[in-house]
Amino acid sequence: MLTVIRSGCKINLYLHVGERLPDGYHSIDSVFLQLEKPYDVLELSSGVGSHEGIVVSFYDASEKSPAPLSDISTVSNTLTRAYEWYASQTGFRPRLLLRVYKGVPRGAGLGGGSANAATLLKYLQSEAGKNGIPELPQDVLLHEARYIGADVPFFLRGGLAHVSGIGETMRPLDPVVFSETLLVACPPVSVSTAWAFGALDAVREAGETVFSSRNGLTIERRHANTSPLAGWKTAGNDFEEIVFGRYPQLAHLKENLLSCGATLARMSGTGSSVFAFFADRKIAHEAGKKIAKDGVTVYIQHTY
């Protein structure tokens, strides 16, 4: 049986990063907004072949004829980790052939890999129930999925949420009508998440600069009485200074969006994608056409 599922992504409306924890993770303070595009496509064939467990292959969906991606491990990735973790918790190990057509750029700070893992976990939950196997309690799923990928718990819920801890603590937010049009710009640049966190840690340890994470702590304390969205437009992203220093073309992209009329432009996650809000949809499309000339892929959409 073939099942085809779209797997979207997210942007960080703001992002503050705490100190590195003993387990290697970092605490964060952010608001995540789930997006429908760009997206990956997951094709799941169940009960096919003589193999045991899951077999995963990846393809580049940006090509007219999707080509296999050889630089993603088919043995160790968020999907195989999600499958093995779920099997260890439930004993449910269906035979699966999974083809992933990557439309979400890698190294873009959009959480495509975590979104894929969450999509697979939802599929396994559904299939387990159909086969008479009790589904995992939602609280266990949300709490433990962080060890598959820090953004996986968010994608299990989706929508709009304040995210803290290492990504496992979520406060769903009421849908907010963003009256402005959202543009997501994905340049042909890939930023390593591991490098970005390591560089941020190194700069902080050297005491070379003061990052806005201190403001993030102030924002965190406010959350008990106010919406985490209060002041998000001025909250910033702690990674911008580090990433823009190494990839000046991303700083240039942000400036271009602002000069095109964006009311706000900001890098998402550890980059390389930059999102912007426009008061006028027509101006957003004009900006998209302009920056696309530099090889940037543009996605324009409404949010809520």
Image (tube, helix red, strand yellow):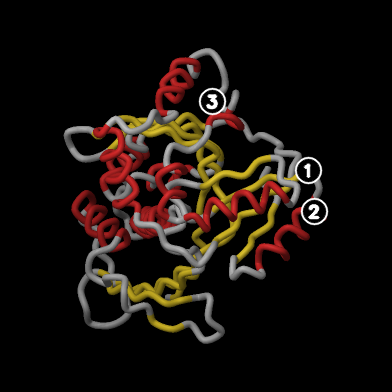
Crowding at dot 1, Cα within 10 Å, few <14 / some 14-19 / many 20+, comes out as some
Q: Callout 2, which amino acid?
A: Ile
The picture places residue 32, in percent across and down from the top left corner, at 51, 40
Which circle's residue, 2 or 3, is located before the other in the chain?
3
Q: Callout 3, which amino acid?
A: Pro
SS class, disc 1:
loop
Any part of residue 32 in sight: yes
Which residue is denoted by mark 3 in the rendering? 228
Q: Callout 1, which amino acid?
A: Ala
Taking depth in this image into account, of 156 and 124 the one nearest to the observer is: 156
User: In the image, what residue occupies the spot 45% across and 46% down?
Assistant: 269
- Asked if disc 1 and disc 3 are in contact, CB closer than 8 Å, the reply is no
User: In the image, what residue occupies the spot 33% across and 60% down?
Assistant: 131
Which residue is denoted by mark 2 in the rendering? 283
Any part of residue 5 in sight: no
The picture places residue 211, in percent across and down from the top left corner, at 41, 30
SS class, disc 2:
helix
Left or right, 102 with reference to 194? right
